[in-house]
Amino acid sequence: MTRTGDAGKTGLSDGSRVDKDTPRMEAIGTIDELNSQIGFARSLIAGSEDMEDIRNMLVLAQHDLFDLGGALSLPGADLLTKAHIDRIEASAERLNAKLPALKEFILPGGSPAVGAFHVARTTCRRAERRLLSQLDCDPQPGAFGLAYLNRLSDLLFIMARTVGASDGSGEQYWEAGKSLA
């Protein structure tokens, strides 16, 4: 324990101290939260052999998120690379090719695992918004971080659909005006 953050400040990798509620720390904190949500979703599919590919993709994403958070804690550092985005896109395309085409919006839910993937997806969208706010305040090179989070949220959605198909919970489609019928 360092106890150096008791007054609402934290240290960055360059040794500077910033308030814990700055846009930079909001982005880092939300990326950390996303990493935890992904770990939780991964834990819910731990016993299923047909989910090994997804588990491996998630572990790589968790490493990427630590890289992204680390880069954000060092002002001026590059935020990921195009190779990170290419890997996420290839994973999404591979999984999506096995799914039926979407005809309607899907209500988040299904099994606990599917629900966890949807929570991770929405947390990812929030992380993307927080990173955008940070970059508006203090641009950093290698703006691949935003694109990465955008693609990762797509991948998490596809994973939710894949897990739902695998565990039999399926998908429930949104029906416009249903609550008024």
Image (cartoon, grey):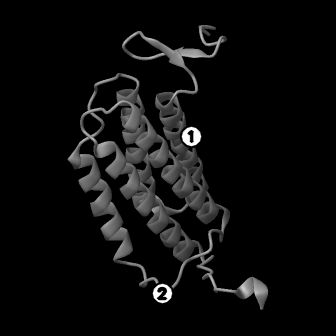
Q: Is residue 58 left or right of residue 7?
A: left
Q: Quadrant of residue 88?
A: bottom left
Query: Image quarter for residue 108?
Result: bottom right
Q: Is residue 129 left or right of residue 111?
A: left
Task: Judge left or right: residue 175 versus residue 163.
Answer: right
Dot 1 alpha-carbon crowd within 10 angstroms: few under 14, some 14 to 19, many 20 or more? some
Q: Amino acid at mark 2?
A: Lys
> Residue at point 24% right, 55% down?
86
Of 28 and 120, nearer the camera is: 28
Q: Is residue 46 visible?
A: no
Q: Quadrant of the C terminus?
A: bottom right
Identify the residue shown where x is 32% and y is 33%. 139
In percent of width and height, residue 131 lies at 43, 40
User: Which residue is rendered at x = 45% and y = 48% of the image?
Assistant: 128
Q: Nearer the viewer, residue 31 or 57?
A: 31
Measure how far apart labels 1 and 2 are at the Cα level. 31 Å
Q: How far across and down, in percent of the image, does residue 109 sit? A: 65, 69
Q: Nearer the viewer, residue 140 or 67?
A: 140
For mark 1, give the secondary structure. helix
Question: Between disc 1 and disc 2, whose residue precedes?
Answer: 1
Question: Which residue does the numbered mark 2 point to in the structure image?
Answer: 103
Which mark, residue 33? 1
Amino acid carrying label 1: it is Glu
Q: From this view, report whether residue 122 is shown above or below residue 140.
A: below
